[in-house]
Image (cartoon, rainbow, N blue to C red):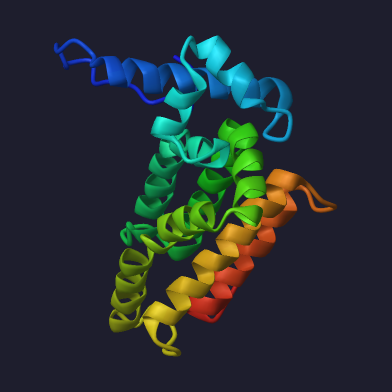
Amino acid sequence: MQRGLPVRSATDRRQPQKSDLRRNAILESLDHHLREVGLDGINIADVTRRAGVTRSAFYFYFENKAAAVAALLEPMYDDGFLASDILTATTRPPRDRIRAMLEALLDTVDQHRYLLEAMLEARATNPAIRRVWDDARDSFIPELSAMIADERAAGRAEDGPPTEVLAELLLEFNDRLLERYTVGGRLTRDQLVDGAEALWLGTLYGHVG
C-alpha cells in the first residue's frame, strides 16, 4: 500500500461507489506525479489522463491541485495525533515524553516529505490550504492545554501564562520545526531535536535536564 492515499476499511464489504473510485484514481495519480515532479511540475491534464477521468471531474472534487494535495495528508494527521498521545501520556517523565514526541514528528517528515514539501508550497499561496493546515495544528491545542494544566496542578510544571497561550505557541514552534526539517538547513536532525527538547522543557518545566 502506498502511503498518503485514502484507504477503505478492510471490513467494508460494500462495493466502492463510482464517485469514490474516480476521486481515489485522481489522488493516486496526483501522488504519483508529486513523487516524480513535485507540485510545480504537475499539470492537471497529466493527472487526469493517468487517472482516466476528465478535467471537469478533477474540478468536481477539488478546487485546485493544492486542495487535492491537502486530501493526501490524512495519514500525516494521524501521525500528529500519535505524537500528541505520546506527549500527553503523563505517566512517563517529561523529558522522555517530549523527546519521543519530537522524534515522532520528524519521523512523520521522513515518511511524508514529498507531501509536506507540496503542502508547504501550497499553503504559502493559497489561503484555503493555509486554513486547512492551521486548523489541523490548532486541533491539538485543547489536549496540550489540558496536559499543561494537569502538570501545573501536580506541581511538576511551572506556573505562567495561560495554558492555551503556551499550547498555541509551542505548537506554532513545532510547525516551524517541521518546516525547517522538511526544507533542510544547517542543523542536523539530532541538533534540531536537542534544541527543541530544551525549549519545550524550559518553557513548561523551567529546566532542560
Q: Which image quarter holds the N terminus?
A: top left
Observer able to see residue 193: no
**Above or below, comparing residue 59 to residue 54 in the picture:** below
* Residue at image coords 56%, 36%: 65
Look at the picture and state if 4 lies above or below 70. above
Please provide percent x and percent y for residue 186.
Answer: 85, 52
Which quarter of the figure has residue 61?
top left
**Towards the viewer: 5 or 50:** 50
Nearest the camera: 124 or 206?
Answer: 124
Q: Residue at x 50, y 62 (%)?
A: 95
**Side (left or right) of 8 relative to 178:** left
Quadrant of image for the C terminus? bottom right
Q: Position of residue 119 (x, y in %)?
A: 59, 44
- Residue 99: % across, % down: 54, 54
Outermost residue toward the bottom in this view:
160
Residue at image location 38% in from the left, 78% down from the top? 164
Given the current orientation, which residue lies at the most extreme right position? 186
Q: In this rendering, does residue 148 appear at all? A: yes
